[in-house]
Amino acid sequence: MQQNISWPAENFLGNEALGERAQFQRRQEHPMERDLKQQRRDALPFKGDREPSADGEYPPLAWTLIWRDTYSNIYGYYVQDHIRRWGYVFWDAPRLERTGGREVLARQWEADWGPTDPRDLVM
């Protein structure tokens, strides 16, 4: 059974399942189509607040803002705690706009990454 598990048990059990090392290792050992979409920077624009489609093509506005309307398959470590704490991906578009959340997200993302796109670090 162990040979069928995608990452070593210590990554998950050591609270590292969402960490940088686990993501890098998974990409090296078990690449997915989603990784290729990220690498190509396939378009993934905001299409409105709806239930997800069968192909999962309705990302939340906040997600499309930080990834500039392109596909991203990174998570956890790459989106810092202070952004994740306020649940940015659960805010619908009107609330994000009405409360100034869009600007807060942009400032926090810029403070964390500046001109760097973290997806470039995992390729």
Image (cartoon, rainbow, N blue to C red):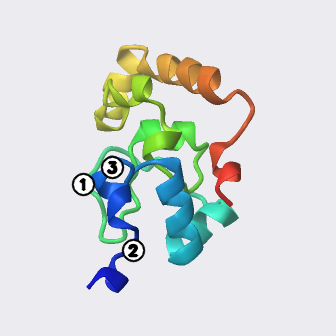
Q: Residues within 10 Å of mark 2 (few under 14, many from 20)?
A: few
Q: Is residue 94 above or below residue 16?
A: above
Residue at position x 72%, y 37% from top? 116
Residue at position x 60%, y 59% from top? 43
Disc 3 from disc 1: Cα separation: 34 Å
Q: Is residue 82 above or below residue 24?
A: above
- For badge 3, the amino acid type reads Gly
Disc 3 from disc 2: Cα separation: 15 Å
Residue at position x 56%, y 60% from top? 24
Question: Residue 52 vs residue 39: left or right?
Answer: left
Question: Residue 47 vs residue 109: left or right?
Answer: left
Residue at position x 42%, y 26% from top? 83
- For badge 2, the amino acid type reads Ser
- The numbered mark at residue 6 is 2
Tell me which label, 3 or 2, sits earlier in the chain.
2
Q: Secondary structure at mark 2?
A: loop
Which residue in the protein does label 3 denote?
Answer: 14
Q: Is residue 12 above or below residue 27?
A: above
Which residue in the protein does label 1 denote?
Answer: 51
- For badge 1, the amino acid type reads Glu
Could you tell me if the residues under marks 3 and 1 are in contact, i.e. CB atoms within 8 Å? no
Where's the N terminus, which quadrant? Answer: bottom left
On the question of residue 45 being in view, the answer is no
Disc 1 from disc 2: Cα separation: 29 Å
Q: Residue 121 placed where, x, y %?
A: 68, 50
Q: Residue 111 placed where, x, y %?
A: 62, 20
Tell me which label, 3 or 1, sits earlier in the chain.
3
